[in-house]
Amino acid sequence: MTESTLAKKRAAWHIKLEPRLEEPSTKLTLGVTLGAVVVALVLGGILIAVVGGNPFASYLHIARASFGNIGVLSDTIVKATPIILTALACSIAFRMKLWNIGAEGQFIMGAFGASAIVLAPVLPAEASRWLFIPVMAMAGMAAGAIWGFIPGYLKAKFNVNEIISTLMLNYIAISWVNFWIFGVWSEGGFQMSPKFPETAWLPRLSQYAESIPFFRGLTTHGGLILGIIAAVILWFIVYRSRWGYEIRLIGDNPQAAKYAGISITRNTVWVMILSGALAGLGGMSEVAGVVHRLQTAPIAAGYGFTGIIVAWLAKLNPLVIILVSVLFGALILAGREIQPSGVPKMIQGIILVCLIASDFLLRYRVRLVHGEEA
Amino acid sequence: MDPIIILQAGVASGTVLLFAALGEVLTERSGVLNLGVEGMMLIGAMSAFSTTIATGNPWIGVLVAMLVAGLISQIHAFIVITLQADQVVSGLALTLLGAGISLVLGEGLSKAGTVSLMPNFSIPLLSLIPILGPIFFTNQSVLVYIGYLLTPLAWFYINRTRPGLHLRAVGEYPSAADALGINVFRMRYFYTFVGGMLAGLGGATISLAVAPGWFSELTTGGQGWIAVGLVIFAQWDPIRAAVGSYAFGALRRLILDIQGPLTLFGFDNPFYYNPYWGFFLQMLPYAFTVIVLVIGSREAIRKRLGSPAALGNPYIRGERGK
């Protein structure tokens, strides 16, 4: 403790850091997290003001344009749906300290895999919805899983840094989809595939408006149900299954896991496959629920990266992810109309920076102590 | 499809990667992993371009870019050195933050038109050397020549000078360095700053020399991440980083040029007649980065080489075994 004796000589008052030995309480975690978000919004507001915008108007606009009425709330949920699935994908990998930042690419490949069922075509256009949707979901998950398997295998076998390999695969996925929609599946030379038959769409609430008038015009689609089911299943895997225990142990203490006879390489590959499959399901939900065709811009819109922040903000808890995703869905939905256009992205970045910085308060007790008693 | 032209342009565009990779080598050698290179490059490219529009002087643009990117790197430094947070997540956050800020501040810059760029010139005598002269010393940007000087300088600094020895000590065995009276925290802040400045210089090299202009996130297009990958391939050695950077630069140019001619090796050029096949070419730099990583990682295992021992770990005074 030479440092504190030195400090004692220099100043009567100084800041003392005590590592917290116990897990921080839920209340403290919640308080610190909310505090970080508030600080982030203030900092973001200052930056908006610096470039000549009005931060109050911007934030008010975000709130009104995303939660103002049932119609926009439904649109917010539509934006939240892909984020739920990409955030779940990130959360399971991060749990094992596997830095899968390729959810974006796995999401795009999932969209491609699901589209291939319609466009190849694997199933004829007359096939029923009951056949289309499950097959598309499986194809999307399989394509995403392959895109997760590659970096997982390279990590397990050659110790290749997964951050860079997953990121590179994101760019490759975009080129891959572009190849198909500019060439083979291009509709009349446009950079998009033909529209899917309606049997390949995930059902929307508005389709049931005839029997339930309240649903008129609501865009929320079946992908939300897929996301919620996935979150519940993932919660059980992480907190209630043997496999989840292994994953958490590897993440917290790989050395102990090794001594307990848990294979890190095998889990690396399987967790990346699961992570990729979840993101791939997100891609399927987006093409079948919203875009209804394969097209690069609306699919490669950064949902994979938002998923990273949402997973972190939710402390990797699958059920909390659902709630946080809705908030970020609101930010993205309302942010489209805000000038300058980079504002939502910037706010996301600031939120993540503040969150990471605030973790310090969860790991250490910061006390102002008088020099004499230290 | 003139190989000399491809290599000449490759050296120019490889200079972008070179600056970013050299900066990351220095940062990582001090034990700090900064994955925010892409974000710092975007900030650098944007501030270089907008400063040059405002002042008309590209040199000021380059200096401002280095300063701004260096300052933004200090956010990462504070989070991981002082607050001891996870370096991976913080670096990722820095990339998102850098991209977001440069998008907001760079709004409208893409329509700004032309600005004065960094000067190009040839080196007398050296440019007369056959093959090497036209590739390396003819009509290159002044930044390219700075890259030639910086590479051996960085190597010499790391391996042959006393501050370089301290740098390596801090990255390999910080508690020993601390015992010798080296200020580990200050050193890590400093080299994170240097890494940020060089990433900013890389960004400025794009917007003021290699591919002038501001095209939002497409300005860098993942080159910051390729640079991070190159550092692993280079085994934290500046000379190897330079070789890798120029090779990647040449690959980028080759991809552009291969789509032009009507025939390739006597066959109809598929990339000319079906342009969408070109998307496979566009995948190549990213695919090669993965391949290069596999090579680098295997070599590291075989030679028992490794990353700087303390890379990614916060230094906490008084803790054993760090």
Image (cartoon, coloured by chain):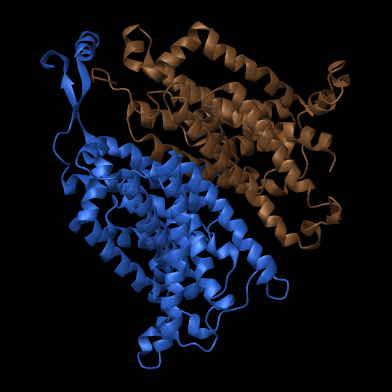
Chain colours: A blue, B brown
Quarter in which the N terminus of chain A is drawn: top left
Name the one closer to the observer, A331 or B146. Answer: B146
**Residue plotted at (14% across, 34% down):** A21
- Measured from the top left, where is residue A31 in percent x and y? 23, 46
* Residue B100, position as x, y percentages in the image: 52, 46
**Residue at 36% in and 11% down:** B177
Q: Residue at x 62, y 57 (%)?
A: A175
Q: In the rendered view, would you say A204 is above or below A223?
A: below
Please give the name of the residue rendered at 60% of the width and 40% of the height, measured from the top-left corner: B223
Quadrant location of residue B278? bottom right
Count of numbered tags: 0
Q: Of residues B282 and A30, which is closer to you in this image?
A: B282
Looking at the image, the residue that sits furthest to the front is: B302
Residue A301 seen by the camera: yes
- Asked whether, in this view, residue B228 is left or right of residue B18, the answer is left
Where is residue B181, by image quadrant?
A: top left
